Image (cartoon, rainbow, N blue to C red):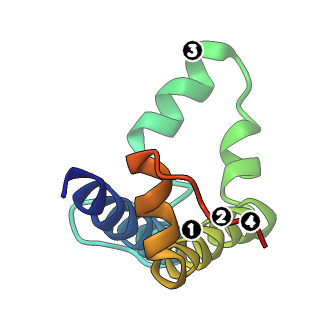
Amino acid sequence: MVARLIVVLLIFLSLEVGIILILFPWINIGIFAEWGDNYILALVSEKIGIPSLRNFVSSGWVRGAVTGLGILNILLAFWEIFHFQESVEMLEGKKQNEK
C-alpha cells in the first residue's frame, strides 16, 4: 500500500514540476516578475559580480532548456503511469519474472 502511494505521489510531483517548468519561463504571473527580470536573479548577479548573468538567464536558449526539462518531467510521469505495477513491485522488493 505504501509503495502504491509513493508511486502515485511521484507521478503527481513529476506532472506538477513539468507543468511549472514548461509554463514559468514564458508567462508573466502577477506577483512574480518576468523570467529574466526578478529580484533574486538581480541580487545573485550583483553578489557574484557577473552582470551578464541576467541576460544569459533571460535568453531564449535557457528558457528553452528549462522548458525541455519540463517536457522530460511530463514524459517521466507518463512512463511511470504506464509502468505503475512494475514500479510498485520494485519498491515492495518482489522479484520480477525474467523475460
Q: CA distance from mark 1 to mark 3?
A: 32 Å
Whether residues under marks 2 and 1 lie with C-beta atoms below 8 angstroms apart, the answer is yes
Residue 60 % position (x, y): 75, 70
Q: Amino acid at mark 1?
A: Asn
Question: Where is the N terminus found, in terms of image quarters?
Answer: bottom left
Name the residue beneath numbered marker 2: 69
Residue 53 shown left or right of residue 21 in the figure? right
Name the residue beneath numbered marker 4: 98
Name the residue beneath numbered marker 1: 73
Q: Amino acid at mark 4?
A: Glu
Depth check: 4 or 24 in front? 4
Q: Is 78 situated above or below 68?
A: below
Q: Of the residues under marks 4 and 1, which one precedes in the sequence?
A: 1
Residue 44 % position (x, y): 54, 25
| Residue at 44% over, 65% down | 14
| Callout 1: SS | helix
Residue 23 shown left or right of residue 67 in the figure? left
Name the residue beneath numbered marker 3: 47
Q: CA distance from mark 2 to mark 3?
A: 27 Å
| Callout 4: SS | loop
Q: Is 35 situated above or below 26?
A: above
Q: Is 98 situated above or below 23?
A: above
Between disc 2 and disc 1, the foreground one is: 1
Q: Is 22 situated above or below 46?
A: below
Q: Amino acid at mark 2?
A: Leu
Q: Amino acid at mark 3?
A: Lys
Q: How many marks?
A: 4
Question: Residue 58 appears in which quarter of the rendering?
Answer: bottom right
Question: Where is the C terminus found, in terms of image quarters?
Answer: bottom right
